[in-house]
Amino acid sequence: MDKNVYDTIIIGAGSVGTPLAWQLADAGQKVLALEQFASVGQGSNKEAIGGIRATHSDPAKISVCLKSIEIFSTWREKYGDDIGWQQGGYSFVAYRPEEEKTLKDLLTVQKQFGLDIDWYDKREFLKIIPSLNPDGLIGGTFSPGDGSASPMLSALAFEKQAKLRGAEFHYKETVQGIARTNGRVSGVITDKGTYTAGMVVNAAGPWGGVVAKMAGVDAPVNPDSHEGGITEPVAPFLKPMVVDIRPTADSANYYFYQHHTGQIIFCITPNPPIVGFDHRETSVFLPQVARRMLEIMPCLQNIKVRRTWRGSYPMTPDGAPIVGEVDGLEGYFNAIGMCGQGYMLGPGLAVLLRQWLTGENAAEAKKILAPLSLYRDFGKKEKLK
Amino acid sequence: MQDYRLKAHPILPIPEREKFEFTWKGQKLQAQAGETIATALFANGIRIFGYHPKDGSPQGIFCANGQCAQCTVIADGLPLKSCMTLVTPGMAVEPVTALPKLPDAPPVKKFKPTETLQVDCLIIGGGPAGLSAAIELGQRGVQALVVDDKHRLGGKLVLQTHRFFGSINACYAGTRGIDIATKLADDVAKFPSVTAWLNSTAVAVFSDQKVGVVRDGKDYVLIEPKTILVATGAREKSLTFKGNTLPGVYGAGAFQTLVNRDLVRCSERLFIIGGGNVGLIAGYHALQAGIEVAGLVEALPECGGYKVHKDKLARMGVPVMTSHTVLSANGTDSVESVTIAAIDKDWKPIPGTEKTFACDTLLVAVGLDPVDEFYKKAKEFGMTAFAAGDADEVAEASAAMFSGKIRGLEIARALGCDAPDIPEDWFRTAEILKSRPGEITHETVPEDEEVYPVLHCSQEIPCNPCTSVCSQGAIVIDDVDIRKVPDYISKQIGKECIACEKCVTICPGLAITLVDLRKQDEHTALVTIPYEFEKGSIQVGDYVTVLNTVGVALGSVEVVRTRIAKTTDRTVLVKVRAPREIANQIAGIEIQNKEVSAPLEQYVERLTDDLIVCRCERVTLAEIKAIIQSGVYDMNEIKAITRAGMGACGGKTCGSLIKRAFRELGTPMSEVTENVVRPLFIEAPLGVFAGVEK
């Protein structure tokens, strides 16, 4: 068998591509993952802060993330590696009636999907997060089934299982073209070689739009950037992810949680968004995010910031991923436009794409992923991204 | 509890300071105003500051420079670097034994807006390079801001009790480092356009060309400089050996900080790894502070430092063992001994050559890495950036001063000031000052004279103070190249030595003696020897062991005079009466007796595998090597797997050790992907960034 011939080539060994390589290899496929960086998860994966939740408002994302949570939460017992999973839950705080209303409205939708999430008034909410500033607090939602893990450790663990099942990973290799023959994808051309495959999955994260173009596909993926940071470790005191969706003049929501190492990890959404691939750290981030965090959690004023970074959110016009086939190019699949949620969506998407690509249970996968089609109406926006 | 503060020092004044109490584990201890927490603990004999939350390993001082976080203690409820935080009256200090509990804090009433400040030039680092640049800028009225993380200006100059090498004209050669620090700081203070912020730490350079500075430990200020000079000096390299993180193993620079800046006798007896100038000088500083030095090992066949430094140490009775390496630091909770061995040409320890020396401290002086992260970021972000001193290229402080001076002028010109062209010979001087020690030639021993200096200075190094003090003009060094060894030309110029002893006093290497045969019988000579120890430790009538240049004992001779005067600037001139046949060879007086450097009867083998690469996250060399051998060539991946580099220091120590592991395993560095470097370069509290009003 020609060594450069594969069943499926995955472009990008990050949050989406790596678990997919594991899943497809597990289904017996010969898989190659191509990655421009030097090792797994060195693009946007390591820039993710590690939050994992199913409590979205979009049904496709809910289904995908429920599958992801099952994988993350059982990883250690099934495969032995500690990926830092903690089921601390997600909490959305309300300090103004506006957010109270938004969250409560959303709750109705979320409950319809059977999600384990509830509204807690101030007194009850403070029992869940005792370190919150009580001044002005109205209450919030809490979903105990959500959690967090380490993106880097997860990527390493997925890669390990993929390799054990025969998947190959080529690093420091940049994709330059996608070969097409008679309306079918036939392979991938890189700066180091040419590979043949009947199926190609674009899991290129922020570069997803660029790679799609190589396949002759227009996909509206445009990265914008958010900065994140991590502190020194302290004794455990904070269980859930804390999200504050109140907008200010220069930022939208921000969120933070205590990582399994004891460190606080935090991130903020700039407003207006900073569009582009620029990943260089700015002086704006720390004062901006620090004030907002301390406003709702005063004890954080004494914790020392260790490191900051800036990562990409591969955004789509409606804030939902683009996953699935494209017209006129058989064998090519998009798994792009994760809008900053590739890490939590990755394993669930991997399971569904496995079903689709191998035909194991294509009908279910197609049904769940249908709303994420490239050909949907991008005019609608998700209530709460 | 015993007080380990220095009571007297031959060079350093011991100030009277306000005393107050603080507590350690609830026990009342005495501190003095101006001491850091680490200093106060050392002064009370406490050298173990905690136990690592990960593996319970004992933790103590390591860098004493605010770069690592190994000395972290809980002070009044907050985890703080004990080497950077001043102790205050009543402060409750506790060891770190687990992840610290974050204390409660009241809601913040008000956030100050982040102050932004525009300056023509921001100088990070107020050491020899930064201050020299600031003086050049000040002279031209350029608005410059110097930020320094310590509580006084001078950088590492404040640790240097010895007279400086280098050029008298270019960089205060012959003056003691501590005095140069004061002089530079005083000069800087004269210029109204130059401001200096102390206790102020630059934490990051951002892509919007602003530099984040935590001013006076509490206010976050964004500096928008037109030009930036990075004069951040160097950090000490580490080494992996068994027990390499035991309390008591630390850098030679850290040691100098504790002894010469903070005035504590932090050790009773130490051992030194590394025969560069830093290690050699640290040994000398130890002896001056009354600390015994059991020995020094250097892996290379020759010490890399100046011969005069090595000889000086050898003369004082410290064995300098070249082609030797350290095998382990031994002890349970702190260093009790060190085991060394000779190495073969492939750097492998030779079985059977192991020796163990009792000591409580092991100084690591195996070289310096430039603190260049600010410069690299500033360049990456397109700023008009300059680097000077060790941050540019690791060399002597004399070279740092001169490179600072050149950068100062370059910056003035870059800002459009009316500054002259930089003279060509400045660049030449800069190169000369940076040069490594050169060839060993000959000692200069004048013949057929009644009274004369003997120049025990045989190696080419950039140094010329002796030439400037001879009233007869009889000591000369080629002006074009001050690296040449000095010549004594009294006969050529027809002048005679007047026995003023100024050359004996000023030589930074203590490498000049004066032999006086006048009024002596034919068997006897008087020899004047420079002596930088307490005058009281040597008395007229004492018999002392004198040694030749490299430390071989020549005999016991009588002291006939000791002289210390304002003009000798704390150097004692000891005159001995000696047999004439050894007079020219006498170069020093033995300070330390041989018992101190006697190895134990049996060597100690450390039966652990604790060769630590990443001190913050406790990652061993074996773990790192196993990962590399599994085919991982991306340092980012090593970090992801092991957390090496994710700790408080951000890979400042382990980065170069991991690269070394790659080299040892034969991986070409061209195949290795280096870590992405991200801010912050120094941790700072969220409250500071938010602008919490305290």
Image: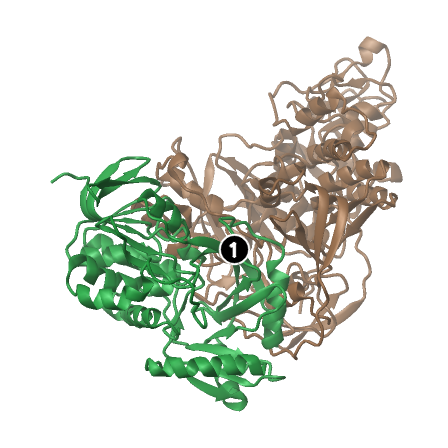
Chain colours: A green, B brown
Name the spot of residue B495 as percent of width and height, x first. Answer: 86, 14
Who is closer to the viewer here, B533 or B212?
B212
Residue B527 at least partly seen: no
Marks counted in the figure total: 1
Q: Nearer the viewer, residue B271 or B689?
A: B689
Residue in the foreground of this view, choosing between B149 and B543 = B149
**Residue closer to the observer: B122 or B439:** B122
- Tell me the chain of label 1: A
**In this view, which residue lies farthest toward the left?**
A1
Give percent across and percent down for residue B461. 66, 25
Q: Secondary structure at mark 1?
A: strand
For the N terminus of chain B, the quadrant is bottom right
**Looking at the image, residue A63 lies above or below residue B498:** below
Asked whether residue B683 is in view, the answer is: yes
Q: Which residue is mark 1?
A: A309
Judge the density around disc 1: few (<14), some (14-19), many (≥20) Cα neighbours within 10 Å.
Answer: many
Q: Position of residue B669 (x, y in %)?
A: 41, 36
Give, as a three-letter code, the residue at label 1: Trp
- Which percent across, then down, holds residue B567? 87, 36
Judge whether B140 appears above or below B107 on screen.
above
* For residue B247, above or below residue A170: below
- Look at 65% across and 22% down and name the residue there: B458
